[in-house]
Amino acid sequence: MLQTSLLTKTFANGTTLHFPDWNVGKGEQWLLLGESGSGKTTLLHMLGGLLRPLSGCVLANGTDLYALSARELDRFRGKHIGIVFQQPHLIRSMTVEENLQLAQSFTGATKDPLRIREVLDALDMGYKRRSYPPELSHGQAQRVGIARALVNRPALLLADEPTSSLDNRNADAVIRLLSDLAGSQGSTLIISTHDDRVKEAFFKDFMFELSHERISDQLEKS
Ligand SMILES: Nc1ncnc2c1ncn2[C@@H]1O[C@H](COP(=O)(O)OP(=O)(O)OP(=O)(O)O)[C@@H](O)[C@H]1O
């Protein structure tokens, strides 16, 4: 359901990242590993249609993401891809429920309040649906971020270091929820982490590791 080929990314300061090709099957759950700075966030953002590579391509469900227009890509992402960021980036002036309604509106489909209720309940956040983000704890805000990523039943769910700022109990709960919810709706799941708690507890089969050797700094070379 997801294939990358010959992906590279160059930043304005000359840092260039080369990514190994990756093939992810439908419904699989993967860990994306690598030390800090090895390129996990960059790769996840390219997979999610948020960051255009310098070269190479990303095929998601057979669609070449970066061959789409910006508008088509936004629509495709809204419908098919859910992203859990390191920080949840909720809109502070909107309630939890309104943040999820906004995510639903990106698909162009009609509102589905029952789905919002269902996904918040699955994350034990139903009782906070009328709260505003500043009234939530960090762990609660992270769960709302997960609810927002799941609300449109994405075929592909990407989570960037979702446990990095959580204590053990919350980290455990968040990974379990991501894994269970993705599994129950048949979504493909990719979690980036350098967190050994995640590595040891949950994933034995599918791991994709990035290494620093694939980063070159053109400024240093020139
Ligand atoms: N906007 C940018 N401008 C310049 N260099 C960047 C930019 N974003 C990332 N980089 C560089 O690209 C490399 C990969 O960064 P990235 O954030 O993808 O790594 P990461 O594996 O996600 O790290 P972490 O685990 O610390 O979040 C690093 O060397 C970083 O300094």
Image: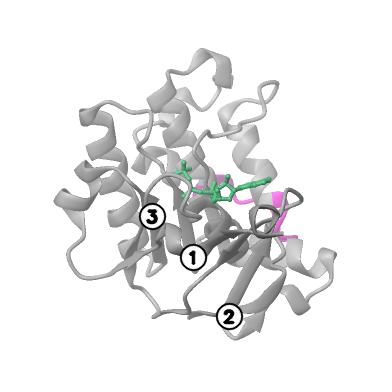
Number of residues whose C-alpha sits closer than 10 Å to that of mark 2, classed few (under 14), some (14–19) or many (20 or more): some
Q: Residue at x 56, y 15 (%)?
A: 134
The image position of residue 72, as x and y in percent, is 79, 69
Q: Nearer the viewer, mark 2 or mark 1?
A: 1
The image position of residue 108, as x and y in percent, is 75, 60
Q: Secondary structure at mark 2?
A: strand
Res 213 seen here: yes
Numbered range of the magenta stretch:
105-115
**Mark found first going from the N terminus, 3 or 2:** 2
Q: Quarter of the image for the C terminus: give it.
A: bottom right
Q: Secondary structure at mark 3?
A: strand
Q: Verify whether residue 204 appears in magenta.
A: no
**Mark number displayed over residue 136:** none
**Residue denoted by label 3:** 191
Q: Quadrant of residue 91?
A: top right
Name the kind of residue labelled 2 in the image: Leu
Q: Residue at x 62, y 70 (%)?
A: 8
**Residue denoted by label 1:** 214
Q: Nearer the viewer, mark 1 or mark 3?
A: 1
Q: Residue at x 48, y 81 (%)?
A: 1
Q: Residue at x 21, y 30 (%)?
A: 168
The image position of residue 187, as x and y in percent, is 41, 67
Name the kind of residue labelled 1 in the image: Arg
**Mark number displayed over residue 6:** 2
Q: Nearer the viewer, mark 3 or mark 2?
A: 2
Number of residues whose C-alpha sits closer than 10 Å to that of mark 3, classed few (under 14), some (14–19) or many (20 or more): many
